[in-house]
Image (cartoon, rainbow, N blue to C red):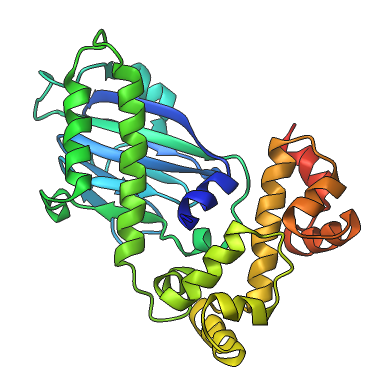
């Protein structure tokens, strides 16, 4: 099972906006703090990314990629003196469509893909993501799939809008780049302390994580999870706590509640039916666990996310 893909589905990560354009100095785009993630590719020219979460602004050049993952405000600007404006206001004065033939020392061509979280991410994986995952162009080796995807995306951006399938191809390639960046961070991230990614890289604990995500409704106990990990009960419990910073059964609870949040948002199923689906015997049991983690009852949460 691909746990990361399942996590993305569980929070309802969906494309909300895609912009490809060329802007001319001075320009600035302000991204407010919202429940979203955003992908940025500088196709030509340069710009700066600045945020209160960065010790110094990032200088972005052609081919550089950035994935903004947190609910934090930040700006993309032509220079550090530029005043940011809302994205729609900036795009209103930008040149849309193919990016070729517009290169000047005064312009920057880029693509932004914004993704919305339909459900509040409570799984520990999302809390561990850095606010910004920055991938400079020179770090993308020519033999890597990310390089091929980037070249395809850049080429597609240069085609005229009348080319058959251009819009859907661009959208899908942006999705591909989003997940390649995420994959690279997971594969290269090594935390010195306890973290979900650290646990994921451990083959024994990963087997237990896969089992939980494949069947969250199963009546998991430490002993049965230890069997999945092919470890003794004591060794499994110790390794899990050391690597993840949490107990196995607390983790099971978080996975179940994240799944319940998805079902409350996406379906009209009753609380009792959802409780069975995620592994609680009764609606009361689900409500008790749900309120402890989310601060509201399942019914109140459903009202909040379906308004």
For the view shown, which residue lies furthest in the bottom direction? Answer: 234
Q: Is residue 37 left or right of residue 302?
A: left
Image location (x, y in percent) of residue 211: 57, 65
Residue in the picture at 33% in, 59% down: 185
Residue in the picture at 37% in, 17% down: 92
Q: Nearer the viewer, residue 83 or 89?
A: 89
Q: Is residue 96 visible?
A: yes
Residue in the picture at 53% in, 64% down: 210
Number of marks: 0
- The image quadrant of residue 30 is top left
Image location (x, y in percent) of residue 175: 37, 37
Q: Is residue 71 visible?
A: no
Q: Nearer the viewer, residue 304 or 106?
A: 304
Q: Quadrant of the C terminus?
A: top right
Note whether 247 is above or below 161 in the view shown: below
Q: Is residue 242 left or right of residue 80?
A: right
Q: Nearer the viewer, residue 34 or 93?
A: 34
Image location (x, y in percent) of residue 71: 51, 49
Note whether 122 is above or below 79 in the view shown: below
- The image quadrant of residue 75 is top left
Residue in the picture at 48% in, 56% down: 1
Image location (x, y in percent) of residue 90: 36, 25
For the view shown, which residue lies furthest in the top direction? Answer: 162
Q: Nearer the viewer, residue 21 or 51?
A: 21
Q: Is residue 277 left or right of residue 162?
A: right
């Amino acid at each position: 099972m691909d746990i990361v893909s399942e996590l993305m589905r569980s929070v309802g990560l969906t494309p909300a906006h895609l912009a490809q354009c060329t802007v001319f100095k001075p320009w600035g785009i302000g991204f407010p703090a919202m429940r979203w993630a955003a992908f940025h590719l500088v196709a030509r020219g340069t710009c700066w990314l600045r945020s209160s979460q960065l010790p110094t602004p990032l200088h972005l050049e052609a081919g550089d990629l950035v994935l903004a993952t947190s609910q934090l405000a930040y700006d993309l600007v032509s220079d550090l003196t530029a005043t940011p404006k809302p994205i729609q206001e900036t795009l209103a004065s930008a040149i849309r469509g193919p990016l070729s033939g517009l290169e000047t020392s005064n312009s920057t061509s880029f693509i932004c893909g914004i993704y919305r979280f339909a459900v509040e991410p409570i799984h520990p994986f999302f809390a561990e993501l850095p606010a910004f995952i920055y991938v400079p162009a020179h770090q993308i080796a020519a033999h890597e799939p990310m390089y091929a995807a980037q070249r395809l995306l850049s080429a597609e951006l240069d085609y005229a809008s009348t080319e058959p399938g251009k819009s859907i191809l661009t959208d899908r390639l942006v999705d591909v780049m989003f997940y390649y960046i995420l994959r690279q961070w997971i594969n290269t991230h090594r935390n010195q302390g306890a973290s979900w990614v650290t646990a994921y890289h451990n083959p024994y604990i990963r087997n237990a994580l896969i089992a939980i995500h494949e069947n969250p409704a199963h009546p998991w106990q430490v002993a049965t999870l230890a069997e999945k990990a092919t470890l003794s009960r004591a060794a499994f419990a110790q390794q899990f706590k050391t690597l993840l910073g949490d107990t196995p059964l607390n983790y099971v609870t978080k996975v179940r509640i994240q799944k319940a949040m998805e079902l409350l948002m996406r379906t009209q199923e009753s609380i009792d039916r959802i409780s069975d689906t995620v592994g609680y015997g009764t609606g009361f049991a689900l409500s008790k666990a749900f309120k402890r983690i989310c601060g509201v009852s399942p019914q109140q949460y459903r009202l909040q996310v379906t308004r």
